[in-house]
Image (tube, helix red, strand yellow):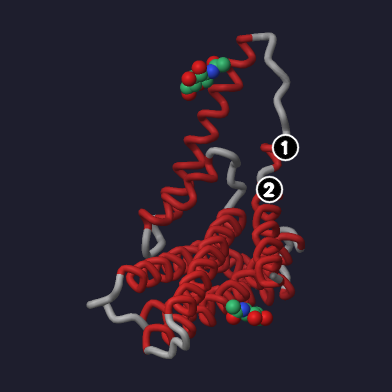
Amino acid sequence: MSHKKKMVSQNLTIIIIFLSNFSSLAHIEPAGHNSQITQTKNETQTQTRTKTVAYIESSCQETRYPDLCIRSLSTFAKYSTIDGPDHLAHIALSVSLTKALQTRGYLLKVVKQLEDEINNPSGHVYLTIQDCVQQINDSVDQLSQAIKELRRVNNLGKNINDKILWHISNVETWVSTALTDASYCVQSFPGYRMSKRTATIKVKAQNVAEVTSNGLALFHRYAVKYREAARSAKKP
Ligand SMILES: *[C@@H]1O[C@H](CO)[C@@H](O)[C@H](O)[C@H]1NC(C)=O
Ligand SMILES: *[C@@H]1O[C@H](CO)[C@@H](O)[C@H](O)[C@H]1NC(C)=O
């Protein structure tokens, strides 16, 4: 099925996005013959990891869902150091895209189940789920665009110029649109008398919305700093 193929290729893209940040993974350490060196290295790694976790924790305090933020980003502290707020935002948006892809996959599975169970489904729940598929599908697309724009920001380097400001505002637009779409999906289900399946959909969509809200907040921190720097650079 072409759709499946597309999903697989999108998942691969994400893995590549992740790996491109994990240059340390590709760097395989030779077996240490000097235990002193190994131990020192081990201590340094532990310190780096502690620092990364501390950085994640302090950055997440400014998000709306700090516990979820810490939980979803801490996994990365095991594999990678985090270079700064733009790198952190990149990781957060990758998490968000992964969640959106997983949720879209789940929704499509439920749609298929409903179609198999009922000959010609047209009930309210079915239509709501169909709408949700569209919205989460849009979120997937918007988050992919946001990550592309963020890569453009990174490629332009640390120079302060209008081109970067333009890409920064594009990232914010894409992510906030993705958040709006995921939130519509959440709100389209009532909070009561839902089947287990519908409740699961709501939880998953809520999760997409929350990690996306966190990603937006983390990126916003970076954007604000950059805009301030741009303003003070313009002053004579
Ligand atoms: C490295 O540190 C961990 C604890 O953080 C310890 O369990 C492990 O044995 C250490 N490895 C070496 C080679 O010192
Ligand atoms: C998702 O959106 C793309 C366009 O962005 C469209 O081609 C595709 O058919 C959509 N998939 C679903 C399941 O709606």
Pinpoint residue 226: horizontal percent, then vertical percent: 61, 65
Say what secondary structure mark 2 lies in.
Answer: helix
Say what secondary structure mark 1 lies in.
Answer: helix
Judge by depth and name the residue closer to the eye, 226 or 134.
134
* Residue 26: numbered disc: 1
The image quadrant of residue 154 is: bottom right
Badge 2: how crowded within 10 Å, few (<14), some, or many (20+)? Answer: some
Look at the picture and state if 59 lies above or below 108: above
Judge by depth and name the residue closer to the eye, 97 or 170.
97
Q: CA distance from mark 1 to mark 2?
A: 9 Å
The image quadrant of residue 160 is: bottom right
* Mark found first going from the N terminus, 1 or 2: 2
Ligand 1 closer than 8 Å to label 2 CB: no
Amino acid at circle 1: Ala
In the picture provided, is 211 more to the left or to the right than 170? left
* Residue 19: numbered disc: 2
Pinpoint residue 106: horizontal percent, then vertical percent: 49, 67
**Residue drawn 61% across the image and 10% down it:** 36
Pinpoint residue 99: horizontal percent, then vertical percent: 51, 62
Amino acid at circle 2: Leu
**Residue drawn 57% across the image and 64% down it:** 97
Decide if residue 180 is in sight here. no
Cβ atoms at labels 1 and 2 below 8 Å apart: yes
**Residue drawn 56% across the image and 54% down it:** 88
In the picture provided, is 211 more to the left or to the right than 222? left
